[in-house]
Amino acid sequence: MAEVQTIAAASRDRAGKGTARAARRAGQIPAVIYGNKEEPLLITVDRTRLEQELGKRGFFIRLLDVEVDGATHRVLPRDTQYHPVTDRPLHVDFLRYSADRKLTVEIPVHFLNEEESPGLKSGGVLNVVRHTIEVLCVADAIPDAYEIDLTGLEVGDSIHASALTLSEGVELTITDRDFTIATIATASVMAVEEAVEGEEGVEGEEGAEGEAAEGADAGNDKTEGGE
């Protein structure tokens, strides 16, 4: 696990749209710390400081220390709500740390040594089926990432879940099959798949656009307790 970073926060007395908007105008982001059968703690965090952490890889799989009124709360970020237009954070949910609570988390997959894959060197394409792997583990055991070595792989080869090295206490949430993470495909196969996906996108464009517009309207008020 990476070093635990600290974020300063201030407590807030109440929820509500008016309070949340006032906080945002002051450069603060409303947030809540919950869990461990304790009362939720309403807080605000500095927007610039929060955006620094959001900009780092793996925000949702890193423990943080949130300092509020002289007390330190170790937490794991669980959800962030964004403005539908500006894409700036509107609200953050933090889950209190528990040494024995198992969590479901998405771990990113990194692919190494593409230049050492004969299949890729001969014109093949890396077809990534899963960019993240869902696992179940306690917060202290969350992996930073899974690294897949592509050395020696030829066109037609596949990488499956069985290739992962799971640390102690970490379990895959999918256990009924050896699912595929990536394959080395020919460029012609990938071109056909992309063409099919493009046609499907055109057919569904009008409906998707309408859904996006509805989502943008709803997103303006989508914060904790309708803040």
Image: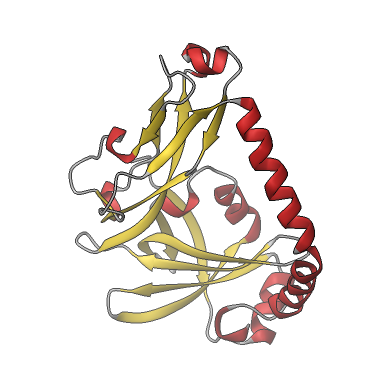
Q: Residue drawn at (60%, 46%), measured in percent from left and top?
A: 55
User: Compared with residue 97, is residue 170 higher up or lower down, i.e. above or below?
Assistant: above
Nearer the observer, 13 or 227: 227
User: Compared with residue 208, is residue 114 higher up or lower down, i.e. above or below?
Assistant: above
Q: Relative to 85, is 119 on the left or the right?
A: left
Nearer the observer, 29 or 125: 125
User: Compared with residue 105, is residue 132 higher up or lower down, i.e. above or below?
Assistant: above
The x, y position of residue 147, in whole percent, is 39, 31
Q: Quadrant of residue 45?
A: bottom right
Q: Relative to 181, is 24 on the left or the right?
A: right
The x, y position of residue 200, in whole percent, is 71, 56
Q: Residue drawn at (47%, 18%), measured in percent from left and top?
A: 113
Nearer the observer, 170 or 223: 170
User: Compared with residue 127, is residue 23 higher up or lower down, i.e. above or below?
Assistant: below
Q: Residue drawn at (64%, 41%), measured in percent from left and top?
A: 193
Q: Quadrant of the C terminus?
A: bottom right
Q: Residue drawn at (50%, 65%), measured in percent from left and top?
A: 79
Q: Relative to 65, is 218 on the left or the right?
A: right
Q: Quadrant of residue 14?
A: bottom right
Q: Quadrant of the N terminus?
A: top left
The x, y position of residue 131, in whole percent, is 49, 43
Q: Relative to 196, is 139 on the left or the right?
A: left
